[in-house]
């Protein structure tokens, strides 16, 4: 309360949300209207950006699915040629069967190479758990820890191992270790 309020004995009513200011000040009303318009424009811009982002995510997902589908289709076309050759080999006479199967194996190997899939050749190399899966541990004349037999060949796609080679690993010569 100020001195004027005390002398008249009346208290000043508090501003109710600034309504008195707006009715008393036309520039305040214009400023409020300008702020409301700016808010509406920004809100509209935000909603449009949010919708654009959702559309972008959906379009990206569709594009990714299409890319994967086309890659699988290309690989399938290569493999279908191998399947056709297997069917021809089955229908051929026994004399040419082995030659036909060897040609099919070479064709399949070429198709895998074309798609970045290469075999891992671990024979006579040191066992590497990043590339090999030990399925047997056998005594042999080879040094301990070296691969002495390949049960199933491993494969890489580019630099990533996609199937570990199943191998038998040497324990070393047990007779020499006992002496």
Image (cartoon, rainbow, N blue to C red):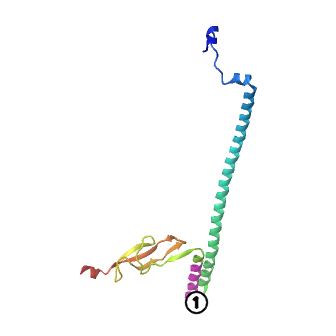
Residue at x 68% of width, y 48% of height: 49
Percent position of residue 140, x then y:
34, 82
Name the foreground residue: 15 vs 121: 15
Would residue 172 be found to the left or right of residue 159 on screen? left
Vertical comparison of 61 with 108: above or below: above
Q: Residue furthest top?
A: 8
Percent position of residue 169, x then y:
38, 77
Residue at x 66% of width, y 61% of height: 63
Considering the image in quadrants, where does the N terminus appear? top right
Occupied quadrant, residue 166: bottom left
Would residue 149 be found to the left or right of residue 59 on screen? left
Occupied quadrant, residue 34: top right
Residue at x 42% of width, y 79% of height: 125
Considering the image in quadrants, where does the C terminus appear? bottom left
On whether residue 101 falls in the magenta region, the answer is yes
The magenta segment: 93-110
Vertical comparison of 36 with 162: above or below: above
Name the foreground residue: 100 vs 129: 129
Name the foreground residue: 62 vs 14: 14
Residue marked by disc 1: 96
The number of numbered discs placed on residues in the rendered structure image is 1
Secondary structure of the residue carrying numbered label 1: helix
Magenta-colored segment: predominant secondary structure: helix
On whether residue 165 falls in the magenta region, the answer is no
Q: Residue furthest left?
A: 179
Vertical comparison of 88 with 1: above or below: below
């Amino acid at each position: 309360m100020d001195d004027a309020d005390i002398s008249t004995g009346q208290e000043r009513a508090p501003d109710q949300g600034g309504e008195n200011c707006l009715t008393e000040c036309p520039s305040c009303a214009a400023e409020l209207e300008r702020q409301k318009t700016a808010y509406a424009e920004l809100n509209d811009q935000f909603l449009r950006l949010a919708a654009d982002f959702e559309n972008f995510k959906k379009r990206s997902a569709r594009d990714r699915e299409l890319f994967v589908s086309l890659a699988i289709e290309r690989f399938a076309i290569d493999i279908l040629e191998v399947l056709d050759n297997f069917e021809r080999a089955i229908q051929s006479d026994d004399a040419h069967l082995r030659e036909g199967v060897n040609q099919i194996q070479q064709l399949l190997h070429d198709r895998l190479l074309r798609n970045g899939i290469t075999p891992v050749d671990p024979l006579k190399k040191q066992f590497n758990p990043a590339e090999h899966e030990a399925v047997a541990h056998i005594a042999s004349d080879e040094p301990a820890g070296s691969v002495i037999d390949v049960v199933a060949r491993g494969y890489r796609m580019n630099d990533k191992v996609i199937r570990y080679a199943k191998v038998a690993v040497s324990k070393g010569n047990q007779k020499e270790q006992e002496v």
